[in-house]
Image (cartoon, rainbow, N blue to C red):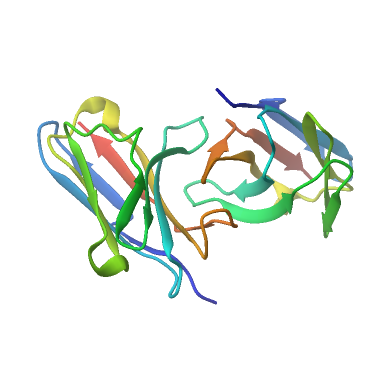
Amino acid sequence: EDQVTQSPEALRLQEGESSSLNCSYTVSGLRGLFWYRQDPGKGPEFLFTLYSAGEEKEKERLKATLTKKESFLHITAPKPEDSATYLCAVSEGNKLVFGAGTILRVKS
Amino acid sequence: EAEVAQSPRYKITEKSQAVAFWCDPISGHATLYWYRQILGQGPELLVQFQDESVVDDSQLPKDRFSAERLKGVDSTLKIQPAELGDSAMYLCASSLDRAGELFFGEGSRLTVL
């Protein structure tokens, strides 16, 4: 069965302190890896889709990268408003299978 | 900007009662999903529709849960009877096709007492 594992479970950063979140996956024939942001009490909000190893995508302070077995979400100079849970998901057949997420807190 | 609408946002019920959640996807989105998210975990797929047909309901507890999408537009998820372990966020999502980006609603938070 396909597995999606995210680490760390929680991360506390000071404002401006860059870091990375990890998503490792085991899937036969990756059809897409997705990153979502989820604020407390809200539904997930789409960030990126990556399809092949070596692919990178950027949005403001976030950059997602993909290798054959894992993806990283790099956060450069984070701000308090970047605080949220970041979810990773992979396509399994015609559905998305999610990891448990990384809870990010950025303190000013 | 088009959004996925869900109601109610919050529902508190006693165990053994019936509960229903409603979802209106983004117009034109053929694929609709119901996910359940337990606190501290990622969303887990309950049921997936393509138009009005069920594509995947392998994780739906069919003894108490039912879902329908009449006319291939809005959808209802029902739980009867509710159990304590059903307390969770119920998320509806839609997409243009079966392999694309999912757009989620705000969710319906269920508490079973």
Q: Nearer the viewer, residue B97 or B35?
A: B97
Q: Residue furthest top?
A: A1
The picture places residue B72, in percent across and down from the top left corner, at 31, 66
Provide residue A35's location: percent of width, then percent of height. Answer: 68, 46
Q: Residue at x 57, y 53 (%)?
A: B99
Looking at the image, residue B58 lies above or below residue B48: above
| Count of picture labels | 0
Quarter of the picture containing the C terminus of chain B is top left
User: In the orientation shown, which residue stands out farthest toward the front?
Assistant: A29
Q: Is residue B61 left or right of residue B48?
A: left
Answer with left or right where residue A30 lies relative to residue B106: right
Which quarter of the figure has residue B71?
A: bottom left
Is residue A61 visible in the rendered image? The answer is no
- Between A15 and B16, the residue placed more toward the observer is B16
Picture quadrant of residue A24:
top right
Is residue B80 left or right of B68 when viewed as pictured? left
Of residues B61 and A104, the one nearer the viewer is B61
Q: Position of residue A22 (x, y in %)?
A: 77, 31
Residue A80 as seen in the image, left or right of residue B17: right
- The answer to whether any part of residue B107 appears in the image is yes
Q: Position of residue B51 (x, y in %)?
A: 35, 63
Q: Residue, x 89% and y 48% (percent of image)?
A: A77
Please tell me which residue is depicted at 55% across the width and 77% down the height of the picture. Answer: B1
